[in-house]
C-alpha cells in the first residue's frame, strides 16, 4: 500500500517536471523558444500586444503589466464577492504592518472599494509590538500609507495592552520563544484594536502561500484540531463579535511582491530582528521547494485543506453507575437542573457552571471566556494571560518593590467588565 | 540589486554596478551568480539564504530589466551592459 502510493507520487512529480512544460508550450501559442535562443521577448497572452513581464505561477500564463494588474485585481474582487466577505456600509479594519502583503492589501481594498462600490468604510489598524529597529521603521511606512491612501490609522501597542513590549519580553524570556509570545499577543491585540474602533471585521494580508504553509504545518504536527479550520477564508467565533478574513487567500506571494514592485508601492521590507519561528521557516522552505517543481501545489494544498473533514469523534459512554453516582451527589447539593453535567470545583473554591455549551468535535468550547482578561478562549485562562503570568513571575525577580500595578489597568477594567449579573 | 532584507547578506549594500566585458564567450546569468557568491557574500553562512543547488534559492524573485527571469531563460540569460538585475526575497513576513 505504501509503496504503491509512493510510486504514484513519483509519477506525479515526473509529470510535473516533464510533461507540463511541453504541454504549456503547445497550449499557448507562446513564442517561448524550445531550444532557448536567448533574448526572445514573449508577448502577453491576453492582449497579444505588449511585452510579457511575468509568468503567473498558478497557470504559467505570461502577462504584460497591464493585463497582470487586471487579472490580479479581478481575481481578488471575485474572491471577495464569491465569498460574500463584506456587506455594504460595513466598517473594515485592515491589519497593516507596513510589509508588502498588508500594503498591497490596503491599496487593493481602496481601489476595489471605489471601483465596485463596496460601500466600505476602511481603517488601517497597526500593532506596535515594541521592537526597536523593526517595528518603529515599519510603522513609519504605515503612517505614509495613511497619507497615500487617505485612511484613518489606529495603532495599538503591546506596551499599552499588556504593559510589556516585545523587546522587554525577549530581554526577560530569551529570543527562542519570541514568536510564541508575539503571535499569541498579536492575535488578541488586533481584536482589541478593532473593538476599540467599534469595528467588527478585520482583514489581514495572509496570502495563499501563508495558508498552504499553515495547512502543511498542521499536517506535519498532527494538529488535526487546527487542520480542519486552517483554510477558512473567514473565521469568527460565536461569542466574539470580531471576524477576520483573508481576501488574499488564493493570491500567490510572488504576485503580491510583483504587484507591489510594479506599482511602486511604498512598503517596508526587513526581517524581524528576532529569531524566526523555526518550524514555520522549515515548512516555508519545503513549500518553496515544492513550488519550484510544481507551482500549482500551493493552490492544490489549499484545496486539499478545504476538503479535510475530521471524522466525528466517538463519544465515550459514561458508565451508567457513574452517572447515577453523580446525579445522587447533585441532588444532595440541591442542584437538580444540571444533572448529567459535570460540575468542577476549582482550587480557589469557585465552581464552574456549564450553560449547556456545545462542545465541538475537536474539544474547543465556543463562547468560553478567559477568567483573567475576558478574552475569548478555549481554556479557563487564555494563552496570552498564561504567557504574561509567566513573564510577571520573572519580572518580580528583576524589579524590586516599586511596581504595584503589575496587573495593569487593562486587566482591572476587564475584571470589572466580567462582573455583570 | 537586492531588496527585501537580502541586503543584510551583502554588508547592507543595496545596489552594485558591474561591467560586462566582451569576451569570446557570452556571459550568462549563472556566471553572475558565481561572481556574486565569490565576491559579495560576506558571510559564507549566508550562502544558503541565496543559493540552493547552484541556482537562486526558490522564494527569491529575480527580475531582469523588470521582467520575470523565468521568461528570460533564467540561468542561461545572456547579460548585457546596462541590464538591471533585481533580487527580492519573498520569504519573510508580510
Image: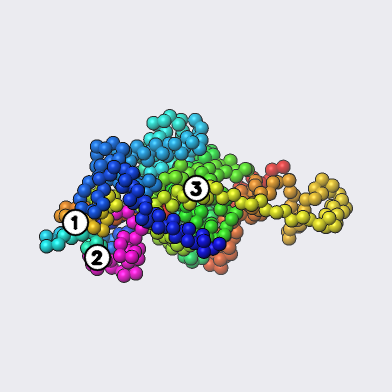
Q: Position of residue A297 (x, y in %)?
A: 43, 52
Q: Earlier in the sequence, mark 2 or mark 1?
A: 2
Disc 1 element: loop
Please tell me whether mark 2 sits on a helix, a strand or a loop. helix
- Give how far apart the Cα atoms at labels 2 and 1 are: 14 Å
Q: Are marks 2 and 3 on the same chain?
A: no
Counting from the top left corner in percent of width and height, residue A45 is at 30, 40
Q: In the visual, does A180 lie left or right of B94? A: right
Residue at position x 31%, y 60% in the image: B56
Disc 2 from disc 3: Cα separation: 39 Å
- Name the subunit of mark 2: B
Say above or below: A340 vs A43.
below
Q: Which residue is labeled 1 in the image?
A: B79
Q: Position of residue A214 (x, y in %)?
A: 50, 54
**Residue A362 lies in the magenta stretch:** no
> In the rendered image, which quarter is residue B47 located in?
bottom left
Task: Return the chain for callout 3.
Answer: A
Which span is picked out in magenta? B35-62
Q: Are marks 2 and 1 in contact (CB under 8 Å)?
A: no
Q: Are dots 1 and 3 on a single chain?
A: no
The answer to which image quadrant residue B53 occupies is bottom left
Q: Residues within 10 Å of mark 3 (few under 14, many from 20)?
A: some
Q: Which mark is residue A303?
A: 3
User: Image quadrant for the N terminus of chain A?
Assistant: bottom right
Amino acid at each position: 500500500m505504501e509503496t504503491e502510493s509512493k510510486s504514484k507520487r513519483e509519477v506525479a512529480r515526473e509529470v510535473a517536471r516533464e510533461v507540463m512544460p511541453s504541454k504549456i508550450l503547445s497550449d499557448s501559442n507562446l513564442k517561448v523558444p524550445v531550444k532557448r535562443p536567448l533574448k526572445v521577448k514573449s508577448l502577453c497572452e491576453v492582449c497579444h500586444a505588449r511585452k510579457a513581464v511575468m509568468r503567473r505561477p498558478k497557470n504559467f500564463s505570461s502577462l504584460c503589466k497591464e493585463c497582470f494588474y487586471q487579472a490580479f485585481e479581478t481575481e481578488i474582487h471575485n474572491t471577495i464577492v464569491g465569498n460574500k466577505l463584506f456587506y455594504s456600509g460595513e466598517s473594515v479594519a485592515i491589519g497593516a504592518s507596513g510589509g508588502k502583503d498588508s500594503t498591497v492589501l490596503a491599496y487593493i481594498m481602496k481601489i476595489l472599494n471605489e471601483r465596485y462600490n463596496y460601500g466600505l468604510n476602511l481603517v488601517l489598524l497597526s500593532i506596535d509590538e515594541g521592537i526597536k529597529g523593526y517595528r518603529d521603521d515599519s510603522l513609519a511606512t504605515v503612517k505614509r500609507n495613511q497619507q497615500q491612501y487617505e485612511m484613518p490609522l489606529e495603532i495599538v501597542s503591546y506596551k499599552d495592552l499588556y504593559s510589556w513590549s516585545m523587546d522587554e519580553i525577549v530581554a526577560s524570556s530569551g529570543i527562542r520563544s519570541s514568536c510564541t509570545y508575539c503571535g499569541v499577543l498579536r492575535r488578541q491585540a488586533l481584536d482589541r484594536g478593532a473593538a476599540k474602533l467599534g469595528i467588527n471585521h478585520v482583514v489581514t494580508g495572509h496570502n495563499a502561500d501563508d495558508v498552504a504553509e499553515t495547512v502543511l504545518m498542521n499536517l506535519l504536527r498532527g494538529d488535526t484540531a487546527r487542520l480542519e479550520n486552517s483554510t477558512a477564508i473567514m473565521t469568527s467565533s460565536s461569542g466574539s463579535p470580531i471576524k477576520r478574513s483573508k481576501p488574499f487567500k488564493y493570491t500567490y506571494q510572488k504576485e503580491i511582491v510583483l504587484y507591489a514592485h510594479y506599482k511602486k508601492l511604498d512598503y517596508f521590507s526587513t526581517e524581524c530582528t528576532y529569531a524566526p519561528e523555526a518550524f514555520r521557516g522549515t515548512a516555508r522552505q519545503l513549500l518553496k521547494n515544492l513550488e519550484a517543481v510544481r507551482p500549482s501545489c500551493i493552490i492544490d494544498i489549499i484545496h486539499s485543506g478545504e476538503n479535510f473533514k475530521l471524522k466525528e469523534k466517538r463519544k465515550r459512554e459514561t458508565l451508567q453507575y457513574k452517572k447515577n453516582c453523580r446525579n445522587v451527589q447533585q441532588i444532595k447539593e440541591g442542584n437538580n437542573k444540571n444533572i448529567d453535567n459535570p460540575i468542577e470545583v476549582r482550587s480557589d473554591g469557585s465552581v464552574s457552571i456549564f450553560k449547556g455549551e456545545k462542545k465541538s468535535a475537536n474539544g474547543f468550547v465556543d463562547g468560553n471566556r478567559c477568567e483573567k482578561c475576558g478574552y475569548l478562549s478555549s481554556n479557563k485562562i487564555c494563552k496570552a494571560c498564561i504567557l504574561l503570568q509567566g513573564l510577571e513571575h520573572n519580572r518580580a525577580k528583576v524589579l524590586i518593590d516599586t511596581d504595584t500595578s503589575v496587573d495593569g489597568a487593562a486587566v482591572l477594567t476587564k475584571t470589572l467588565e466580567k462582573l455583570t449579573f | 540589486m537586492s531588496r527585501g532584507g537580502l541586503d543584510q547578506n551583502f554588508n547592507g549594500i543595496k545596489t552594485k554596478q558591474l561591467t560586462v566585458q566582451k569576451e569570446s564567450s557570452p556571459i550568462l546569468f549563472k556566471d553572475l551568480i558565481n561572481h556574486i557568491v565569490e565576491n559579495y557574500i560576506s558571510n559564507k553562512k549566508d550562502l544558503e539564504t541565496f543559493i540552493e543547488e547552484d541556482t537562486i534559492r526558490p522564494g527569491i524573485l529575480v527580475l531582469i530589466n523588470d521582467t520575470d527571469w523565468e521568461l528570460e531563460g533564467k540561468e542561461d540569460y545572456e547579460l548585457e551592459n546596462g541590464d538591471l538585475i533585481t533580487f527580492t526575497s519573498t520569504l519573510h513576513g508580510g
